[in-house]
Image: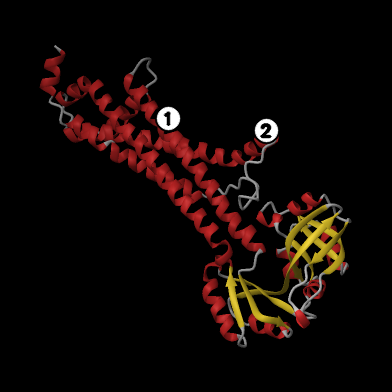
Amino acid sequence: MSPGDRLRLAARYTFSLGGGQLSTFLSSLSMLGLVLAISLLIIVLSVMNGFDKEMRERILGMVPHVTLQAHEPIEDWRAQAALVARHPDVVEVTPFVEFDALFMRGERIETARGIGLAQDDPAAASRVLGSLPPAGLQAFRERLDSLVLGVGIADRLGVVPGDEITLIVPGSGQGESARPTRFEVVRLAGVLDTRTELDEVAAIVPLALASQLAGIGSGVNGLRVVTSDLFAVARIGWELVNSLPPGYYATNWMMTHGNLYSAIQLSRDLISVLLFSIIAVAAFNVVSSLVLVVFDKQGNIAILRTLGASAGDIASIFVMQGAMIGLVGALLGALLGALGSLVVPGLVARLENLLDINFLNTDVYPVSFLPVDLLLRDVLLVAAVALAMCVVAAVYPALRAARLAPALVLNQDR
């Protein structure tokens, strides 16, 4: 038999539109299982990729990669910042001040960790305050008593930009070193709506005001460092500490968000293994389907053998049929999975509006929406693995068809 003849027979067994043909029904059933498994895997992988991307680009874009602090307030922070900026892996250096605070509006009180950032620092504006509207960013830069709150805190306080809020910094220490409780009336310049967990904790004031409230004069608590390599922050932090005077120490994002990032990666790997096993089950369905096709077509196989077809010809017909099932299933599954990945965020958002339920809340999850990042390499990998599994699954039915004894089959049909 020529390769073209074998290909036509395989296509006939797979796609024949004749009514009631068992081989076509079984092939279609196998394809359907593959399409569902592949599309589901691509959608889930895209969602997990979305969480990974949001973690790296959105959340880690606003939190410092490395934080340099000292046991005492840093008075000469400009000189130290210039020293840190010389490191080849350092992209940006920003001073900051931290303090515990209460925010009071009427009878409502919220606690938060206040952060002071330089008003004229473009790095702080682009990274931390990047989601503010231009009017809010301008108000923060112009007023010394301005405040930026995360949308979660602002909603609980019931405030909007332009409202005045009483900021209370509790006193600390005892004796001569005791610091009294400080009260300050600040004006809300803008509301930070990043749709991440930062919306529940962000409370940002100008650096000078934060230093005054923290009782450290013109000093700062530390330096926020952005690096060029997210996963080398331990090494970079150690090198930066060694380049600074004694008394400094470094923390990095892996200490605060590392467990979350690892959990996302572990979940992605476990779900991939689980869903690839579903594809393996679908491929096993190809085995059972082709075995039944061989049984159904054993009369045709015997006639082909008596007309001169070799065992290899018969085996190749069913391997081709398995490859066709895998190819069509992979293509349709990849297409459906890609379309589903693009549609799922909108469907989830509409369902949330319809039911008035937030499936993802920043009190629990790192983001408040369903992120999706469809990667071509994932689509190609899933489709290629599914196709390979189908080809391998077709080997056993093909060998069984090749071993059929034509005389015995024709004698049974008499």
Query: Residue 85's x, y, as percent?
Result: 65, 80
Say if residue 177 shows up in the picture: yes
Give me the residue at 57% from left, 51% from top: 51
* For marks 2 and 1 on the same chain, the one whose residue lies earlier in the sequence: 1
Q: Are circles 2 and 1 on residues that touch, CB within 8 Å?
A: no
Q: Nearer the viewer, residue 364 or 336?
A: 364
Query: Residue 47's x, y, as percent?
Result: 55, 46
Say if residue 321 shows up in the picture: no
Q: CA distance from mark 2 to mark 1?
A: 32 Å
Q: Is residue 406 above or below residue 176?
A: above
> Furthest-front residue in view?
175
- Residue 173 placement, left or right of 234: right
Figure colour scheme? secondary structure
The quarter of the displayed image where residue 119 is located = bottom right
Instruction: Report helix, strand or loop for mark 1.
Output: helix
- As drawn, the label of residue 32 is 1
Query: Residue 294's x, y, as percent?
Result: 24, 26
* Residue type beneath disc 1: Leu
Instruction: Report helix, strand or loop for mark 2.
Output: helix
Q: Nearer the viewer, residue 273 or 308?
A: 273
Q: Is residue 350 above or below residue 381?
A: above
Q: Quadrant of the N terminus?
A: top left
**Between marks 2 and 1 in the image, the one whose residue lies nearer the viewer:** 2
Query: Residue 385's x, y, as percent?
Result: 38, 45
Q: Nearer the viewer, residue 394 or 156?
A: 156
Q: Is residue 178 above or below residue 402?
A: below
* Residue type beneath disc 2: Leu
Count neighbours of disc 2 (C-alpha within 10 A) and say few if under 14, some if 14 to 19, many if 20 or more.
few
Question: How many numbered circles does the render carry?
Answer: 2
- As drawn, the label of residue 355 is 2
Give me the residue at 78% from left, 49% from top: 155
- As drawn, the label of residue 101 is none
